[in-house]
Image: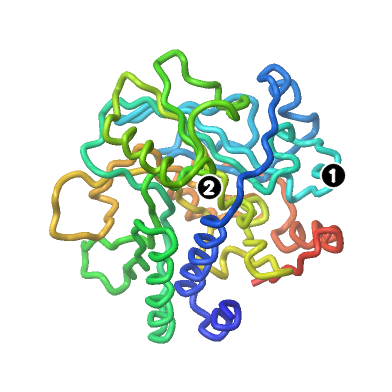
Amino acid sequence: LILVIFVVVGSSYFGLAALVLVLAYQWSSSQKGSVQTKSQQQSKASVHPQGYQDPLRWSFLPSNGVQRANTLESTKYENDLCELKCLAMHRPTHELWREASSDYPYAWHLHGRKRLWEIRVQMRLKQVPSSKLYFGIELPDCEAASTTARQMKAVLIRAIQGVIGDFYYSDGEDPAEAKPGEEVEPSTFVMPLWAFDQFVVSEVGEEPEITGDLSNVGMRRSDGLKAYVKELQKCVEHFSKDKVYTFCIWGVSQFLDCIRWEARGIFPGMAVNFSRFGLKPPLNIAIYEMPGDHPDARHLRSRKRYYLNVAMWSTLQPPEKKKLEELIGSQDVVPETRQTTAQALRSMDMFACCSGLTRAYL
């Protein structure tokens, strides 16, 4: 039914709202996966098979260079608010033969699980947040929506609120409709920190290595949502510059193939390009606060203090060069030898009969 309405309405806003609703429902009802353990020494030895080329790219903002997923070491970054270590793992959905043979980075951790990817963030605060922290995505582009789409979206947003509770969602504002010099709000979907699937609080120097096995540390959502939210709220209320905080997310990854830039498992037998939901590359992933009381409730960039701000994209469906240069600087945009997007995606579909998916190229 959602798919039928989505096609009729044809709005990227409605598509995004529908995607969020279904993901929220699926996420809230997902079951704990099987536990797999390995020593860090074993994990490190098998992390990066020879010849593996990863299409996933990301960059901190402001940029310190373009990074890749599935790296042997975590990537370090520092801003005025915190020190960060980050790691992105992703299964090789562009090379399915590697899935079958477990010949890919972090197969010791990802193979045999529902998750397509996992993101790990480790943070030591320089400044303790003075207000609520939000975690989620920003969409840099805003497109006009029809009246019908807005009405349908309103119904869906109310349904989303009933599923996942506390969140903030905005369509964003069209810069073309703004007054000269007026700031516009980007399209935004953010949640509290309990959107993460696992968190660990450590003494400085005793924090876990995020490239290793974290199965026996910290607390997980799947251990019981009520208790998890309570403990994480307690953690947030007592944030300290003398602790190290580790956050991991993977729950929604089974539906979001970031390498192929498509949603899967939402509509039976179909994989749909992210762009149909208004998710055009790059995608901004952020942790931020908006300190101080303000009569304007919009999440304007000028009011945000970013603890984490990352742009993410795939070389199989890259952003426009100009857009990428505006985000990370022309010096960090490195030309890469690749097939065209259509060629690359269709060449991978020789395995479509094995995956059982029909792909919508939109």
Query: What numbered label is drawn on residue 41?
Result: none
In front of the other: 7 or 66: 7
In front of the other: 318 or 82: 82
Marks 1 and 2, Cα distance to the nearest angstrom? Answer: 26 Å
- The image quadrant where one finds the C terminus is bottom right
Q: Looking at the image, can residue 335 be seen?
A: no
Q: Are marks 1 and 2 in contact (CB under 8 Å)?
A: no
Query: Helix, strand or loop at disc 2?
Result: strand
**In the image, is residue 235 above or below residue 270?**
above
Q: Looking at the image, can residue 272 be seen?
A: yes
**In the image, is residue 115 above or below residue 161?**
above
Query: What numbered label is drawn on residue 100?
Result: 1
- The image quadrant where one finds the N terminus is bottom right
The amino acid type of the residue labelled 1 equals Ala
Given this view, does label 1 or label 2 mark the residue nearer the observer? Answer: 1
Residue sitting at x 69%, y 71%: 360
Residue assigned mark 2: 312
Which image quadrant is residue 38 in?
Answer: top right
Which image quadrant is residue 54 in?
Answer: top right
In front of the other: 68 or 206: 206
Q: Position of residue 180 (x, y in %)?
A: 21, 67
Query: Helix, strand or loop at disc 1?
Result: helix
Q: Position of residue 354 (x, y in %)?
A: 85, 59
**In the image, is residue 258 above or below residue 133?**
below
Q: Position of residue 112 (x, y in %)?
A: 75, 42
The amino acid type of the residue labelled 2 equals Met
Question: Image check: 51 left or right of 86?
Answer: right
Question: Image check: 226 left or right of 118?
Answer: left
Question: Image check: 168 left or right of 72?
Answer: left
Q: Position of residue 130 (x, y in %)?
A: 21, 37
Residue sitting at x 53%, y 28%: 75
